Amino acid sequence: MAEKTYLQAISDGLREEMRRDERVFVIGEDVGVYGGAFKVTLGFQEEFGHWRVIDAPLSETAIVGGATGAAIMGMRPVAEMQFADFVSCAWDHLVTVAAKQRWRAGTPVPIVVRLPSGGGFSGGPFHSQNPESWFAHVPGLKCVCPATPEDAKGLLISAIQDPNPVLYFEHKHLYRRIKAEVPDERYTTPLGKARTHLEGDDVTVVTWGAMVYTAEEASRELDGDGVSVEIVDLRTVLPWDKAAVLESVRKTSKVLVLHEDTRTGGFGAEIAATIAEEAFEDLDAPVKRIAAPDSPVPFSPPLEKAFIPQVDDVVQGLRELAEY
Amino acid sequence: MAEKTYLQAISDGLREEMRRDERVFVIGEDVGVYGGAFKVTLGFQEEFGHWRVIDAPLSETAIVGGATGAAIMGMRPVAEMQFADFVSCAWDHLVTVAAKQRWRAGTPVPIVVRLPSGGGFSGGPFHSQNPESWFAHVPGLKCVCPATPEDAKGLLISAIQDPNPVLYFEHKHLYRRIKAEVPDERYTTPLGKARTHLEGDDVTVVTWGAMVYTAEEASRELDGDGVSVEIVDLRTVLPWDKAAVLESVRKTSKVLVLHEDTRTGGFGAEIAATIAEEAFEDLDAPVKRIAAPDSPVPFSPPLEKAFIPQVDDVVQGLRELAEY
Amino acid sequence: MAVREAEPLGSLREVKEAGLDREDLLGIYRNLLITRGVEERGHILYRQGKIPGSFYTGRGNEASAVGVATAMGPDDVGTPLHRDMGVHVTRGVEPWRIFAQYMGRADGPTKGKDGNVHMADSKLGLLAMVSHLPAMLPVAVGCALAFRIRQEPRVAVGWFGEGAAARGDAHEAMNLAGVRRLPVVFICDNNQWAYSTPTHLEYPIEHLADRAAAYGFDGVVVDGTDVLAVYREAKRAIEKAREGGGPTLVECQTLRMEGHAVHDDAFYVPKELFERWAERDPLERFRSWLRENAELSDDEEEEIAGGVKRLLNEAIRRADESPLPDPASLLEGVYATPEDLDTPHHK
Amino acid sequence: MAVREAEPLGSLREVKEAGLDREDLLGIYRNLLITRGVEERGHILYRQGKIPGSFYTGRGNEASAVGVATAMGPDDVGTPLHRDMGVHVTRGVEPWRIFAQYMGRADGPTKGKDGNVHMADSKLGLLAMVSHLPAMLPVAVGCALAFRIRQEPRVAVGWFGEGAAARGDAHEAMNLAGVRRLPVVFICDNNQWAYSTPTHLEYPIEHLADRAAAYGFDGVVVDGTDVLAVYREAKRAIEKAREGGGPTLVECQTLRMEGHAVHDDAFYVPKELFERWAERDPLERFRSWLRENAELSDDEEEEIAGGVKRLLNEAIRRADESPLPDPASLLEGVYATPEDLDTPHHK
Ligand SMILES: Cc1ncc(C[n+]2csc(CCOP(=O)(O)OP(=O)(O)O)c2C)c(N)n1
Ligand SMILES: Cc1ncc(C[n+]2csc(CCOP(=O)(O)OP(=O)(O)O)c2C)c(N)n1
Ligand SMILES: [Mg+2]
Ligand SMILES: [Mg+2]
């Protein structure tokens, strides 16, 4: 075990899988000589050559559509979007071709699309989005949102080996900020299984990605109040681990659903609606949602702070639930 | 007043608005000589000429991006997608450019995109989708889903005059099947306001589009049981009329949210989650959702019947709620 | 760079040089008949109410589809579209499965999940089209990319209509293929109409094949009603790609001889145009050619036509016996399992 | 069709013929200085921690941006990108508002909602770029469509980088513009790199301007460091479009003289390339030209430079006085109101 950043864990996981499985290749803008905008594939082209680390033209449709074709021919493409925001330029290929091909025609499409997501550094409306909710409404896709370095590696390897199109949302704000022990050997972390980030008895927070840490900080502030918070890190948004969430809810009877993306139509609604339907009798308070307000992601720091859910917002939400 | 089909109401509304406001023009594939795949613009090119009824190349991005530019220059474009499904090819322009331009740069984008949506006639996975839930998660867009001929006309005129990008989902299965009185004169139906399709006391159904009629049929079957059903037709999905929904819920204390699109991450989740949060103390039963199962839309009739919510499904859901 | 306009293929000798013996020629003829037969029969079934949804045919495009498919090698792959029934037929899809697909039965290649020619047998090297045009072009390029990475001598063939050429997917696919000189051949079925839209409203140049120059590869225009000329040009392009020569754009000129789909009577197409192109019916052209150049006899002709007729009768009977899908199958296969990967392409 | 490679513009006489008097020339020089000055000062502010997020400049591209903008008429509109600060400057955006934008202040054109050169003053006929490249090209074509429908003698100018040329938006925009012969001019800032990607991995042909032939209009290649040559070619193209002659694709050749953004040291660009293009610095080139051909004196030069310096000092001071936006403004303008439509374009 060694301590690694979230970024390093992704990079190492990918490199190891490429060494182990020669079907795996990387395609994206500036992933070669430059090592990718965030340097996840730094040094890869030297090790694996130009045909396994492919600098593509600025062509998200060709990248994702091309990955789809290569996957159908037996490869295991890992496509990188330079920023998650640009996946909107490959939307049609993901929802129309990749998501439906297995169901319609029996042809699995084992691709991974890596999506550097999220805000917190004045990236503005086009370099800060968390687009997982759009895709979590598309049957046939899987959406993975790791929060820890260990999960980042294990989920990436699972995603690569999964026979389905997997969108792998890596949160940019965690890249270099979050460090933790990561097993050296190869391991897989199962898709679709939540992880209890913190055990507690009074209120459950269901969240994922960078918000796991916001929830954690908030929970610490509640220690003094004697409120014990359980944090369920979904890890996979589609399919999501309903069983684990309901189990926690049955224990605490109060839930806060938290995400960085905007509120209306966000995936938090699905979680809240499901809990409200399936754990109706177990709830001691309405399921609360905290999410970004319904606007694009702003650039200027005071606006961005007002946009991204802050520790204080979560503290307040938890207090309200605790007192309900 | 004259009796008109839903299709005729759309066509008439559009034609009248083009006569009244010369900034309005139509652009889309085969909208000219052919009058559009569903003949909504039949005869328009003869009346308005080639430059107000524009047969575009097979280019959804150019159509929507072009409409955006023309709108910014003061026009009121009404773009037609041949089928709503193909809007996935214009996704980026809607979510990246049109939705965010007013907020970012102060430039309103008054476009309407007409989207023939929905299933029920073996259109298969690419000619039957209801994509409103994807867009209902995009701040800056409006999503309109008329159910009646009268609303179809009034909402279309409102959409054209609205200063924002409006997606106008017209349900293909209503086109020629639904007929009703439509006022002859010009009128607008406000965006964002629900309509009570049926008044009742015991259970509220919140729905829109073709499912309004499914709910209506189901409610008739419950007459014998003495269960009185209220049907709230949202008409606009974004922004949705939360006040009207909560008011009905406070009256009946039981709610069924019903939509034709797939369940997970569908907009029904937003409605259910909001009700469960904001009317928690008023609910006598969990908010129930009925929606299509999580798969693409199938072609073969028995599969399509299993996919689209049927009257029987709604009857059963209502009974369960009534008996809860 | 001006595109090359392909000459018609004349004599049996030239054809032999192009790699076809008499057996092959009769096979092509048979495939043309089956292709048209499948669609004509389908049309009847549709009118009888046995086919749900809509119905499309590729009448006028049979030679183009069969010609290209004949030129493909056994390990090559392709992404044919809604006018390319001949590709499925030539690659060996059994007609009864096509009828089962049309009728939404459990034995169709998509098991009733999708309809029309939205199908393909991946074991035969074909990928099922999506409606969104021309989304299969980047996918075909991706197949070629896999071949290039693995250095396999295989070629991908991607089809698109002249109308769909307007979409960004065509551009991104061709640009990537050009930059990387991938083993892919682009076939444009130019049937002069995109639904009701004539070519001058779809693209502003004379030949779509000229676009190849924008991507650094060759373009060629071929008479799409001449199955042998199509075959020769496709073969050239495919073998060039196989040898590392990069992509080619082959534009096959035809006329869509019917409406866009059954509901469309094509009122917007000038009658004379139909008349003019009817004289170049691909089947009739090839039949006469065979009679003139390959001594096709009355007996042989009858035998082939009779065989096709029996095949189709039997196919419809068998398709009609196939059950409608079980509603419970709706949710099958939304997600793939690891076992699903044991397909021929995933070895 | 081979593209035309534009000649450099030589003498003052030629320039006069092209429509520029000495006043104009000095104005161009001033705009070039302001453009570079804004970006240099911005860079310093960035290093001082006064600008959040990232920071991009258009060093090397100033002549291209200023030259094209100078050729635009007052009612023409444009969609400049991240290397085209010179367009904003030339159209008259006040530098203090640009600094306010950089610094995320309430008085920037986007009021702190967006950053960098993701801005525009619509009153000056400019549309704010989105990051997604080149999504503004279809939008520019849409502007031209409005002009064509209303038969106004106005032209839209759309910018794109040679890297972004690979995306479908470029294709769909140019195809629609070509089919309808719309009054739009496409300006390709070919600065030889797309982030770290060299041109041969972006497109497989010699000149991107050759692509114009794929859409039935003219292409021209111009030295993007020669502001007068750029001006002349842009002017030609714009006036041709205005007169109904349809689109032109103008490829301006430059080198991106810095990294993609501040964090990028451009290690992947050969040093000699930088050295070679440094000799063609657009500002220095034009300064010498003015001295040789238009009798630019030391005094004049100093006066202009001094004026620009004062302008920028004052601009930074004023921008720095602008408050950060009120968090409550976050939700303002997510939806437009009818009053918002009372902008110059919506009359
Ligand atoms: C992206 C997209 N937009 C619209 C359609 C609807 N549509 C189906 S076929 C067709 C015309 C296609 O023309 P062309 O590419 O020339 O092919 P053809 O049908 O003539 O063979 C259209 C507009 C579609 N399938 N995909
Ligand atoms: C659709 C899209 N994908 C990726 C990016 C990220 N990106 C920003 S600039 C850039 C390179 C652009 O190259 P080019 O078009 O040549 O413009 P330049 O920056 O060289 O002026 C990339 C890849 C983007 N902005 N948009
Ligand atoms: Mg066609
Ligand atoms: Mg560049």
Image (spheres, coloured by chain):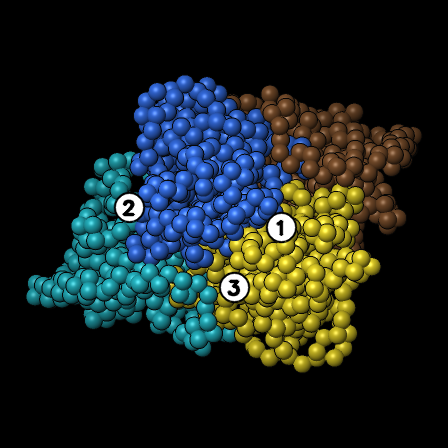
Chain colours: A yellow, B blue, C cyan, D brown
- Most extreme residue toward the left is C299
Badge nearest the viewer, 3 or 1: 1
Is C267 displayed left or right of A318 in the figure? Answer: left
Residue D309 can be seen in this image: no
Q: Is residue B92 above or below residue B103?
A: below
Please name the residue that numbered disc 3 is placed on. Answer: A165
Q: Quadrant of residue A222?
A: bottom right
Q: Do the residues labelled 3 and 1 touch (CB within 8 Å)?
A: no
Q: Earlier in the sequence, mark 3 or mark 1?
A: 3
Q: In which quarter of the image is residue C96?
A: bottom left
| Residue A206: mark | none
Q: In this view, does C334 lie above or below A118?
A: below
Q: What's under tag 3, amino acid-wise?
A: Pro
Q: What's under tag 2, amino acid-wise?
A: Ala
- Rounded to the nearest angstrom, the CA distance separating label 1 from label 2 is 53 Å
- Rounded to the nearest angstrom, the CA distance separating label 3 from label 2 is 33 Å
Write the residue at 57% across / 44% down: B282
Is A196 displayed left or right of B130 in the figure? Answer: right
Residue C106 can be seen in this image: yes
> Looking at the picture, do discs 3 and 2 lie on one chain?
no
**Mark 3 neighbour density, 10 Å: few (under 14) some (14–19) many (20 or more):** many
